Image (cartoon, rainbow, N blue to C red):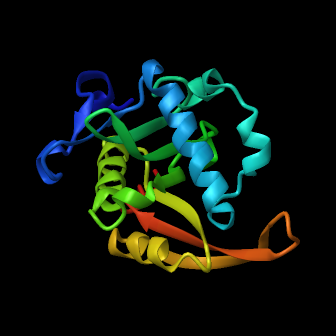
């Protein structure tokens, strides 16, 4: 489905500061991915739909489904500085014919120590470039917690526009309800019906 997934493990290295690398997640990365994800969920419960307490008990191997090739139009990109994992982004699609033209960005995260270095933008651009290789894909969606202004602005800079809001989308352990902005980016014009 994605030729670059099979032939290139590193993408967009030329646009990153020296020492940084963005590549597809490998089996050997699962423990580092789980550690980053657990830390981000614990520190930013308002930014993620997943619950930190529930996810903490998951085994690293349970994230194998996020490896490229594990499912239809599914991959996870990781951003590394040497041996330190700084960020991640997953993309997925549904294989059903009527919605096969839509991809979803899920689980975007950049460690606080790496924020402000353009890593989130680089992860998103790498993901969009891989998704654009699939000529059947027309739309890419994501949701972002309404109060997460830096993330929302990043997505807007990448070309996403808000098309709706889901009020009370997540309920935090303390009972607060947070809204999610629903955003979309058009990769290409719709294919005319035959």
Question: Where 24 falls versus 139 (above or below)?
Answer: above
User: Quick check: 189 above or below 42?
Assistant: below
The residue at 50%/67% (across/down) is 184
Q: Residue 21, how many percent across, how many down?
A: 24, 40
Which residue is at 64% across, 53% downward? Answer: 41
Residue 97 percent coordinates (x, y): 60, 40
- Relative depth, front residue between 172 and 77: 172
* Image-based side of 56 in relation to 25, left or right: right
Q: Quadrant of the N terminus?
A: top left
Q: Which of the 4 image quadrants contains residue 112? A: bottom left
Residue at horizontal 27 percent and vertical 63 percent from the top: 117
Whether residue 178 is visible here, answered yes or no, is yes
Q: Nearer the viewer, residue 142 or 140?
A: 142
Between residues 152 and 18, which one lies in front from this camera angle? 18
In percent of width and height, residue 133 lies at: 31, 42
In the rendered view, would you say 90 is above or below 69? below
Q: Which residue is found at the position 47% from the left and 58% from the top?
A: 139
In the image, taking residue 180 as reference, residue 142 lies left or right, namely left
Residue at the outermost right position: 175
- Residue 65 versus residue 117: which sits nearer the camera? 117
Q: Is residue 43 left or right of residue 77?
A: right
Q: Is residue 92 in view?
A: no
Residue furthest front in the image: 113
């Amino acid at each position: 489905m994605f030729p670059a997934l099979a032939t290139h493990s590193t993408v967009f290295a030329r646009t990153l500061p020296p020492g940084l690398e963005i590549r597809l997640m490998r089996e050997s990365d699962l423990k580092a991915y789980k550690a980053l994800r657990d830390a981000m969920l614990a520190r930013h419960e308002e930014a993620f739909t997943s619950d930190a307490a529930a996810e903490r008990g998951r085994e690293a191997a349970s994230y194998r489904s996020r490896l490229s090739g594990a499912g239809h139009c599914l991959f996870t990109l990781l951003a590394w500085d040497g041996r330190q994992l700084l960020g991640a982004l997953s993309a997925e699609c549904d294989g059903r014919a009527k919605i096969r033209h839509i991809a979803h960005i899920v689980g975007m995260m950049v460690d606080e120590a790496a924020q402000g270095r353009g890593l989130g933008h680089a992860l998103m651009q790498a993901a969009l470039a891989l998704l654009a290789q699939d000529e059947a894909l027309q739309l890419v969606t994501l949701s972002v917690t309404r109060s997460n202004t830096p993330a929302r602005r990043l997505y807007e800079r990448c070309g996403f526009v808000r098309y709706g809001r889901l009020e009370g989308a997540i309920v935090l352990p303390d009972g607060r309800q947070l809204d999610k902005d629903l955003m979309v980016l058009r990769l290409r014009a719709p294919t005319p019906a035959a």
